[in-house]
Amino acid sequence: MSDYIIEMENITKEFPGVLANDHVTLQLRRGEVHALLGENGAGKSTLMSILFGLYQPDSGVIRKNGQVVQIHNPNDANDLQIGMVHQHFKLVEVFTVLENIFLGVEPARLGVLKYQEARQRVLELSQKYGLSVEPDARIEDITVGMQQRVEILKMLYRDNEILIFDEPTAVLTPQEIKELMAIIRGLKAEGKSILFISHKLNEIMEVSDRCTVLRKGKCMGTVDIKDTTVEELSRMMVGRPIQFKVEKGNLKPGAVVLEVENLVVPSKLHKNNAIKGVSFQVRAGEIVCLAGIEGNGQSELVYALTGIEKITSGSVRLRGYEITRASIRQRSRLGISHIPEDRHKYGLILDYNLADNLVLQRYWEPAFQHNGVIRQDQVLAYADALIKQYDIRAGQGPQTIVRSMSGGNQQKAIIAREIDKNPELLVAIQPTRGLDVGAIEYIHAQLVAQRDAGKAVLLVSLELDEVMNVSDRILVLYEGEIVGEFAPRETTVEQLGLYMAGARRSQRADASENQGKAATSRKGQLS
C-alpha cells in the first residue's frame, strides 16, 4: 500500500487570464495534518476544490491509496470519504442548521425524513467537538461564526477520513480556535488525514506536521514543521521578510466623530436585545476596537451604526449630526465607510465585475456619470488605479467577475473601495479575515494611516493579537453590554479573555449599569 493516502501530481488549472495551479504536486500521508500555505490568489482553494470535485484539472492525476481516481463532483469525493469545510460557505440560507448538515445524506425510512435521529446525532457531534449550534435556526439568521461550525459539522456528520479545512479559523474567536486546534489533533489521533489551509502561521506551526507552500500558482516546496520557522514560511510565501509588529506613532485624539448613547438593538435569534443600552465615543485620530467572543452583539451593533439594522432606542451622532434614523446611503455620504464581516452578503455584488463593485457607493458622483449615464472609461481607469494600489489580483483586471476571485482578493477590493472614499469614520469588522500575512501587514498599515490622517476608526476583531497591536483603546462587549475599557499597553491578552468570557466587569461598566438602574428608579418614582 502507498505511503500516501492522497497524491495530487502535476495538477494544472487555468482560468481566463489566470494560471491558478501550475504543475502542482501535493502528497498527504496517512494520519498527518498537512498545511497548505500561500498568498491570496496563490491557488490553494483551487487545488483543494479540484480534490473535492468542484473543478476539473486541465492536466495531472489524483491518486488515493496509490490508485488513480476520477473525482467529477463532490458526490464522488464523498464516496471516496473526502470532506471539505469551505472558505466561502456552501449553505442554503433558507434551510435550518439541521437541514444543511444532513442535506444530501438525509436519514429517511419509507420516504419520511427521520428528523429526531439526525438531530440527536448532530447534538452528539456538537457536544463531542465543542461546536455549539442551534439546530432549528435558519442559516440566514445566524452569525458567520455559527455558519462555520455548521460547515465543520456537515463534514463530521459524513464521517469522512480525508478532511479538508479551507481557512476554518477565519471567523472564529481565540477560544474557538484553541478548541478547533484540539479537535484537529483529536481527529488526527483517530486516524484522520487532514489538509489544513490557513494564512495564520502560528496555527500552522502549532497543529501541522508538514507544510506545502504555493506562490502564484507554483509549488515552492514542502517542509517539515519541526525543521522550519515562521519567518522562513513567510519568506517562502511572499518572497520577502514580513513585519509582524504594527508600527504606530503617538496617539493624538481629536474631536468626537462617533457618539453612541444608550443604544438598544433587537436580536434576530432571541427575544432579548442584542445590544443593551451601550454608550461610547470614537474620536478623530484614534482606533477603538470592540473585542468580544462572537455572538455577544458586535455584528448587531455595527449593523445598527451603518444602517443595516433598525435601532430600538438610543441615539447615534456623527460629527454632532443625528443619524439614528438615516438611510445607508445618507450615512455613506456623511462620511461612514463600512468593511463588513460577510463580504458576500453585504460587501459585494458577486455577479458584477470588479470595476462596478469598486464604484458601488460612488457611481452617481460627477467623476463617474454625466446626465445619468455611467462614464465607463472613468470607472475603468479608477478601478485600474485601485487594483494597482491595493494589489488586487484579478485575471481580467477591472472586467473580472467578482465571484471568480479568491476570497482574499474580494476582501482587498472592499477595503480599497471603503478607504478610498476618504471617510470621517471607518467601521471595519474583521478586515483581515482570510488575508495572507503580506496583505495583513498592508491593511494594518492602512488602518494606522487613516488614524494618523485624523480619521476615526472603529475596529471589530476576534483576533486578540490584532486587537492588542492595532487599537489605541479597547472596549470589551459581553452579552450586549460594554463590560470593560482598556488601553492595550496597560492590559494583557489573559485579562481581556476574562472580560470577554464575562468573568469580570470594569468599574466603568459597573458605574454605567448603576446609572441605568438609578435612572429607571427615578422614572418609576416620577410616575
Image (spheres, rainbow, N blue to C red):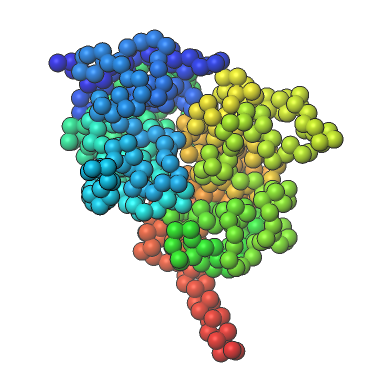
The residue at the point 51 percent across, 35 percent down is 440
How many marks the image carries: the answer is 0
Q: Relative to 521, is 369 on the left or the right?
A: right
Instruction: Spot the residue most to the left.
Output: 1
Q: Quadrant of the C terminus?
A: bottom right
Residue nearest the observer in this picture, 145 or 506: 145
The residue at the point 27 percent across, 16 percent down is 69
- Toward which corner of the image does residue 222 lie, by quadrant? top left
- Toward which corner of the image does residue 47 lie, by quadrant? top left
Where residue 186 sits: x, y (%)?
A: 21, 39
Where residue 287 sits: x, y (%)?
A: 58, 50
Give above or below for 149 relative to 77. below
Q: Quadrant of the N terminus?
A: top left
Residue nearest the observer in this picture, 388 or 240: 388
The residue at the point 58 percent across, 56 percent down is 309
Q: Relative to 106, is 492 on the left or the right?
A: right
Give above or below for 203 relative to 334. above
Q: Relative to 117, is 482 on the left or the right?
A: right
Give above or below for 473 relative to 108. below
Q: For residue 496, say whether it is visible.
A: no
The residue at the point 64 percent across, 34 percent down is 357
Instruction: Spot the residue most to the front.
Output: 110
Q: For residue 524, say whether it is visible.
A: yes
Residue nearest the observer in this picture, 21 or 490: 21
Residue nearest the observer in this picture, 38 or 4: 4
Where residue 468 sits: x, y (%)?
A: 47, 48
Instruction: Spot the residue most to the right.
Output: 371
